[in-house]
Image (cartoon, helix red, strand yellow):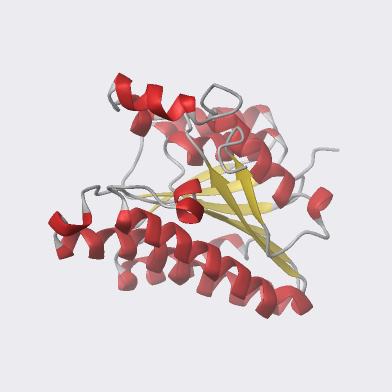
Amino acid sequence: MALLENKKALITGASRGIGRAIAERFLEEGCEVWGLSTKPSQAASGLKEIAEKNGTEFHEITGNVGDADNIRAVITEALKDSGGFDILVNNAGITKDGLSFRMKKEDWDAVISVNLTGTFLVTQLVSSDMIRKRTGSIINLSSIVGLHGQGGQVNYSASKAGIIGLTKSLAKETGSRGVRVNAIAPGFVETDMTAVLPEETKKTWMETIPLKRGGTPKEIADTALFLASDMASYITGQVIGVDGGMGC
């Protein structure tokens, strides 16, 4: 039996990178997936093919997690159409890097709005339904920089640190109702976002990684699969570092 057979998941930021890898992995394990993107994506057709091969379905929905009114309407409709979700993966996020003394307030606000407030808004709606059903698994994507900080990323680091606090607090609120809440803190992962970094920056990162390589989106997806499945039935309120040892 597939690990997520007969389960339904909502994944934000599902059109590329880590979010797409998680969607693919869940579909391979029999999960019916709703993938949220800011606009219709080229990834949808490929994800639908994977779903068909595994006897399940992929549904693309569009919305902006940085727009409170919009995302509330989109998620409310998705809950109605799906009948509710067994799994929520909060993956949507943006970066607007810069040194703190030069950072524009709008760049601070945008990153906090999407990464942290957006996670809160989606979770508030989905977790309320999970609490009513007394079951569910919520997985929030944080980052190693939320644990250790990173120069030039005060807004991003603050948003990812906030997600850790949200995760631990929500786990305390929902545990008695059968809902588990955990976070994944990836390190340097080879995605489109990191591909554009200067080679010198990548080299500096690699020197700090005991395993001497970057991670892959699939390795993050495998961790999400574990946390979403019954294999992690006694795990909640945890931050799982998937960082090649950077945080040790």
Q: Depth check: give the residue in front, 202 or 174.
A: 202
Which image quarter: residue 71?
bottom left
Q: Is residue 210 above or below residue 12?
A: above
Q: Quadrant of the C terminus?
A: top right
Q: Is residue 29 above or below residue 165?
A: above
Which image quarter: residue 117?
bottom left
In this rendering, position of residue 120 left or right of residue 229: left
Q: Depth check: give the residue in front, 46 or 100.
A: 100
In this rendering, position of residue 171 left or right of residue 115: right
x and y percentages locating residue 56 in the rendered image: 66, 39
Q: Confirm whether residue 48 shows in the render.
A: no
* Residue drawn at 61 percent across, 45 percent down: 241
* Residue drawn at 59 percent across, 38 percent down: 220
Q: Depth check: give the residue in front, 120 or 10.
A: 120
Q: Quadrant of the N terminus?
A: top right
Q: Is residue 15 above or below residue 97?
A: above
In this rendering, position of residue 181 left or right of residue 141: right
x and y percentages locating residue 99 in the rendered image: 21, 51
x and y percentages locating residue 106 in the rendered image: 16, 63
* Residue drawn at 55 percent across, 37 percent down: 246
x and y percentages locating residue 74 in the rendered image: 40, 64
